[in-house]
Image (cartoon, rainbow, N blue to C red):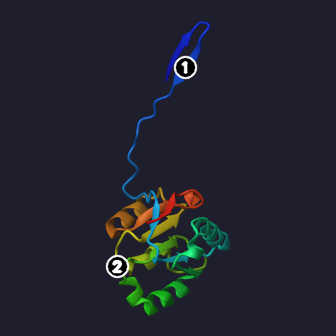
Amino acid sequence: IAIESTLGTGTTITLRVPVVRPPRWFFPVIRLNRVQKVVILDDDQSIHSIWDKRLGELGVQDQSFSIVHLHSAQEFSEWANSSASILAEAPAPLILCDYELIGEKQNGLDLLRGLPPGPALVLVTSRYEDPHIVDMCINLGISLLPKNLAPFIPMEII
C-alpha cells in the first residue's frame, strides 16, 4: 500500500496485489465448444438450476449444446455405459460431477475414475481442501472446482 498526498491537490492510494498462480487442481474457466455436450451429476436440484442459469446466460439454447442432467450414481453409470462413443468424441463432454452423493455407496470421484482422463472432467465439491481428494484428482487428471464458485466461475464459448 502506498499513500501519496499533496496538500490542496488530493491523495492517491495505490494498492498492489501480487499475482498468484492458482493451485494445480483448480479449474479456472469453463470453455465450451459450440457442439460440446455438458453432463451435470448432482443430487441437489439447486445446483442443476445454477448450471442451467449459467449456461443460459451464455446462450446455449442458441448453440448445438446437449445438456444431460443426472441425479444419482446409478443414472451416471447407466449414462456412461450407454455413451461410450460420446465419451470418445472430440470435444469430449464436459462432466461437472458432485463429490458427495447422499445415500450413495460411490462418490463422484469413484464415478469419474472409470472414465478416460481429460480436462473435461471436473469434480465440483465443497471438499476441495481435503488433501486426499486433491491428490486423487491430480493423479487421475481430474480438475477441481469449489462448489461455492459454481455461480461465479468464468464461462465462455470458443
Left or right relative to 44: residue 105: left
Q: Is residue 123 above or below residue 129?
A: below
Left or right relative to 58: residue 131: left
Provide residue 5's location: percent of width, then percent of height.
55, 12
Residue sitting nearer the eye, 110 or 120 = 120
Residue sitting nearer the eye, 34 or 87 = 34
Q: Residue furthest bottom?
A: 82
| Residue 101 appearing in the image | no
Query: Tag 1: Cα neighbours inside 10 Å, few (<14), some, or many (≥20)?
Result: few
Residue at image x 35%, y 63%?
A: 138
Provide residue 51's location: percent of width, then percent of height.
59, 69
Q: Residue furthest top?
A: 7
> In the rendered picture of this protein, how many numbered marks are placed on residues?
2
Among the 4 quarters of the image, the one containing residue 59: bottom right
Q: Secondary structure at mark 1?
A: strand
Q: Which residue is mark 1?
A: 12
Looking at numbered disc 1 in the image, what kind of residue is underneath it? Thr
Provide residue 42's location: percent of width, then percent of height.
58, 74
Among the 4 quarters of the image, the one containing residue 61: bottom right
Residue at image x 55%, y 61%?
A: 126
Q: Which residue is mark 2?
A: 116
| Residue 8 appearing in the image | yes
Identify the mark nearer the N-term, 2 or 1: 1
Residue at image x 50%, y 28%?
A: 15
Q: Which mark is residue 95?
A: none
Q: Secondary structure at mark 2?
A: loop
